Image (cartoon, rainbow, N blue to C red):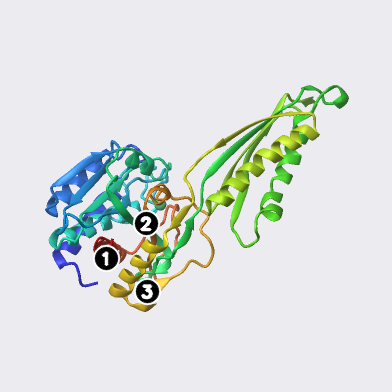
Amino acid sequence: MTSFTPEERERIVALRRALHAAPELSWQEHTTQRTLRAALEQAGITEIQTVAETGLVATIPGRDPHAPTVALRGDIDALPIHEETGLPFASRHAGVMHACGHDMHAAWTVAAGILLARDPAVGTVKLVLQPAEEVGEGAARILASGALDDVRMIFGGHVDWRFRVGEVVATAGPLAASTDTFTVVFHGRGGHGARPQDAIDPIVGLGAFVMAVQTLVSRRLDPGLPGVVTVGAVEAGRAANVIPEQARATGTIRATTPETRTLLGNGVRQLAESVAATHGLRAEITLSEGTPPLVNTASAAAIAQTAVRALLGDTALRTLATANMGGEDFACYTERMEGCFLRIGTWHEGRSAAGVHTPRFDPDEEALFVGGAVLAECARRASAAPR
Ligand code: NI
């Protein structure tokens, strides 16, 4: 990647290391925000807005005021993990770590800004430094602020240790799953464990529900479409000889399209109700919406692919072997506007293959320049595209 000067490269790495050493959890990104603001100012970007409390939206005016506005998003929050990399710039905050690479995302978004401030795109580019991705709240708050109301297309990326530095995934269609949660409480009637005929046992109903809910994916979902229903916690009773009053199950539902999301959510509700009816129980069901499925739009993915090919060559484009069932709140943006979320390789031979969300995650910093250059190129091409 020749697009950055040696001085700029040093500055981008220093920024990433400063962010990495001082990670902050969701909605606490105050130092991070100050560090990022200073880095943007140093790049000559003057229009910087505080958005969503700990976030920033920086505007780089384009050459043609009538050209479409494009946004580039980097998330900035860290995870409650205690770092064990032993790196000289390892986290100074005990129990908090940039283990999902959001330090890389923030730094490469600023890196894109350095390129775009030096040589503006046709249209205006907004850099979105978004807080609270890990809790799935930041993107919605940025959108609610109205700061992106004029944006036509948005791009962002995530580090991916499964791909080499210089490899990028930029596919149209589903890229991350929805993250809804459910809680079902079965209300029965407690009693003596020796006299079940006088009670209504919610534990037997709970057991039937836990088994039945797995048939949603195996029997109701198209086998060609990915989906997950996981019961992650169950809770009922305290003693061997007591039938409790109630039993509770809570879990997560993952889907990659709005249709399968609805199918699985409705399925959980119907099964809980019918199991309750079968066992003479009452089911109290709560479905909580998490982030929606992330679906890259065809037009934005096509632009991203062209950008990747132009910068890195035809062999740089890769695809995910299987659907990613993790969540990503970039999905909130693509619900509202066209967009493409990329996976950007951070691995090379001889390097630790520790994955994200682990205490030894250590991405190759060379990926900063790939991310910065690719995102800047996406913005250039998107803002110059015919309207
Ligand atoms: Ni992440």
Identify residue type, mark 2.
Answer: Gly
Compared across the picture, whether 163 is left or right of 12 comes to right
* Residue that appears at 61% across and 35% down: 183
Residue 29 percent coordinates (x, y): 30, 40
Q: CA distance from mark 3 to mark 1?
A: 18 Å
Specify the quadrant of the image occupied by residue 365.
bottom left
**SS class, disc 3:** helix
Q: CA distance from mark 2 to mark 3?
A: 20 Å
For disc 3, the marked residue is 316
Residue 344 percent coordinates (x, y): 37, 64
For disc 2, the marked residue is 339
Q: Is mark 1 within 8 Å of ligand 1?
A: no
Identify residue type, mark 3.
Answer: Ala
Callout 2 touching callout 1 (CB < 8 Å): no
* Residue that appears at 43% across and 41% down: 135
249 shown above or below 84: above
Residue 340 percent coordinates (x, y): 38, 59
Say which of marks 2 and 3 sits in front: 2
Specify the quadrant of the image occupied by residue 12.
bottom left
**SS class, disc 2:** strand
Say which of marks 3 and 1 sits in front: 1
Q: How many marks?
A: 3
Compared across the picture, whether 47 is left or right of 320 comes to left
Residue placed most toward the observer, 239 or 304:
304
For disc 1, the marked residue is 381
